[in-house]
Amino acid sequence: MDLITLIGIFFASAFVLTLLEKFVFKITNLPANFIRNVVGIWFIFSGVVKAIDPTGTSIKMEEYFEIFEKYIPALTFLWKLLVEHALIVSALMIILEIYLGLALLLGTWKKVTIWLLILLIAFFTFLTGFSAKTGKVTDCGCFGDFLKLAPIQSFYKDLFLSAMILVIFFSKRSIREIFPKKINRAVLLILTLAAIGFTYLNVYHEPVKDFRPYVVGTSIPDCLKLPPNAKPYKYENTFIYKNKKSGEVKEFKNTWPQDLDNWTFVDRKDVMIQKGDDPKCKDFAIRDANGSDNSSSFFEETEYVFFIIVPELKKANDKGFEKMKAIGEAAEKDGKYVYILTGSVIADMQAYEKQHGLHFEVYNSDATPLKTIMRSNPGLLILKKGIIAGKYHYHDLTTYENLKKEVLK
């Protein structure tokens, strides 16, 4: 699905809802209420797809905060604090997004709701505008992993949403509560609590719906290949030169000065204007302590291979490791292969193993694909001939015998 199709679905849904409100609830000013319904549906959908994978949203927010630290080092303490609590920030943002969408559809507390919408869309527009201008954070995660957008697409999307919210602001008198006040607020409370529970569920377990490329049943070797007829990336290249005589600093888009001898190169900025296609399982590899890529040997293995996934050792859960240890030792006794695959330094992982009585051989991979595979730290990935047979959050693991009945058939 692409963005235009998704917007079409929002508009069609809002049209049906507006007609229903006209004939059942006798609303007036249909154009303004139609736009209100579009925005409400949009915010609810956007929030729900993020709530399916709040950890994924927090990873995106961490990227932004880490980049902001480089741009505004005077606030380093703030950016580090936000990185540390990115999951809480993301969960609150997701719940607020769903809440505002629901409140807008129900017409509850319309003044506060509209002002909060304005502030939230201003925040989103700043983030996507920053990405579009700088080329940093190439996917804002606006629709989670459900739909990937280029930064410039995300920015234009937020400008479009901003315009619709301004229409709602100037026509707020036509908005009224759909149900009687007490019922309206009770419905809003119940649905908001449901959103909080749903978000919480997906923080402490693997997402209920997996939109990531590493879904169970995926062949990782095939997933590492570029798709046929892959679309190329397109960038706008800006070259900055300084005139040797006048001292003038000038930008040249997609070209450079014709009288190049009179200019000195200063800098170059590349902004993505079209997101190209990548292999879905980009950057995944299984490397040993020497840096050699051992992926192919694991992909050819006909026996089940258990990988304890540790994207970042410093954030790993010790109790989760106790479960992994029990599962891993039982799997080894049953003739299965068990390894640790970490995004951290192998020597640090080995020191952690020694401290906690673990003995599994350790391999290394880039932390980014490991965070994509598993929202759990640690988590369990089971492969057979390179195909994902199962993956588990440590909260969802019980015993090896149960795992054997579920996966090792």
Image: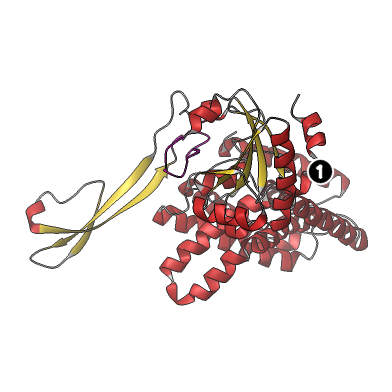
Q: Nearer the viewer, residue 74 or 362?
A: 362
Q: Residue 19, percent across and down? A: 79, 42
The residue sitting at 76% across, 24% down in the picture is 409
Which quadrant of the figure contains the N terminus? top right
* 10 Å crowding of disc 1: few (<14), some (14-19), many (20+): few
Residue type (three-letter) at the residue carrying disc 1? Thr
Q: Main secondary structure of the magenta part?
A: loop
- Can residue 225 be seen here? The reply is yes
User: In the displayed structure, does residue 264 sit left or right of residue 37?
Assistant: left
Report the residue marked by disc 1: 398
Q: Nearer the viewer, residue 234 or 89?
A: 89
User: In the displayed structure, does residue 187 sit left or right of residue 276?
Assistant: right
Seen in the picture, residue 59 relative to 4 is either above or below; the reply is below
The residue sitting at 71% across, 62% down in the picture is 172
- Magenta residues, start to end: 276-293
Q: Nearer the viewer, residue 232 or 16?
A: 232
